[in-house]
Amino acid sequence: MANRADAAAASIKPDDASALLVIDVQNCFLPGGSLAVKDGEQVVPVINRIAKAFSNVVLTQDWHTPGHVSFASSHSGKKPFELIDLAYGKQVLWPDHCVQGTDGAALSKDLAIPQAELILRKGFHNDVDSYSAFTEADGKTSTGLAAYLKARGIARVFVAGLATDFCVAWTALDARKAGLDTYVIEDACRGIDTQGSLAKAWTDMAAAGVKRIGSEDIAV
Ligand code: VGL
Ligand code: ZN
């Protein structure tokens, strides 16, 4: 496929130094959810299939306080998908989503990755968003994921899930900053695509050396 790493089918064999990062496959981002990503449910069978090839799997959960700063409802007169300036920079405002402990914040019941060892929650500070699984949107508060992966001997991460242009892309970019060999599995992700965000995400990821592959490139 155009733009993808020039790899023959099923040429990548995940090893013990590889981890699959499954980003935010949560009810709010799936059909019927408050921030449903178009065709988001289609990533689930793809992720379940490739996950069989990984001994190291990390699942993430967007995990916001009620009244979180990223919610349009927390800012009077603002609507979802508008942009505001916060202390740490620009913030897209979202419909309320993934509130701690709610059914919307639960991982999809259709995910079948029993060997996953870590569920990492992010975005739990009321005044700071966190698209990335590594570093919050203030650009400095660490989630601890880089240290965890390093301690486990992980050198290579494969990123899948929702949404391509936000949590997947920011996670992949921070993985590069952490010195990890980073792959995004395109057909195991779906995007929100607001104000050109999807094209920009792929451009930024390519510039950072993120490798764009398809699930068929992974030997399962
Ligand atoms: C996400 C918008 C807001 C994501 C999370 O998982 O990509 N997007 N919160
Ligand atoms: Zn969120």
Image (cartoon, rainbow, N blue to C red):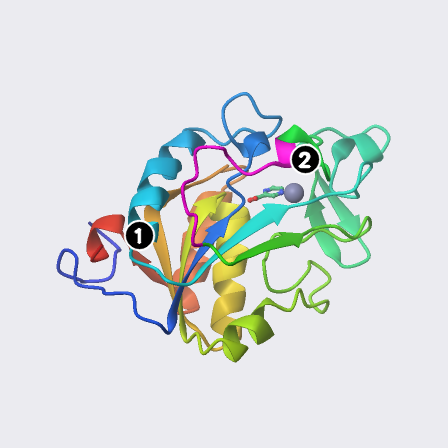
Mark closer to the observer (2, 1): 1
Does the magenta segment cover residue 108?
A: yes
The location of residue 219, given as percent across then percent down, is 20, 58
154 on left or right of 143: left
Distance between mark 2 and mark 1 Cα atoms: 33 Å
Question: Along the polypeptide, which appears first: circle 2 or circle 1?
Answer: 1
Tell me the quarter of the image containing the C terminus. Answer: bottom left
Which of 126 and 51 lies nearest the eye of the viewer? 51
Q: Which residue is mark 1?
A: 52
The image quadrant where one finds ligand 1 is: top right
84 on left or right of 46: right
* Residue with the most extreme right position: 76
Is disc 2's CB within 8 Å of ligand 1? yes
* Residue with the most extreme front position: 114
Which of 79 and 24 lies nearest the eye of the viewer? 24
Q: Residue at x 26, y 50 (%)?
A: 215
The location of residue 60, given as percent across then percent down, is 56, 51
195 on left or right of 80: left
What SS does tag 2 mark? loop
The location of residue 214, given as percent across then percent down, is 26, 51
Which of 195 and 22 lies nearest the eye of the viewer? 22
Q: Which residue is mark 2?
A: 94
Which of 128 and 124 lies nearest the eye of the viewer? 124
Is disc 1's CB within 8 Å of ligand 1? no
Which residues, given as a range, are shown in magenta? 104-115
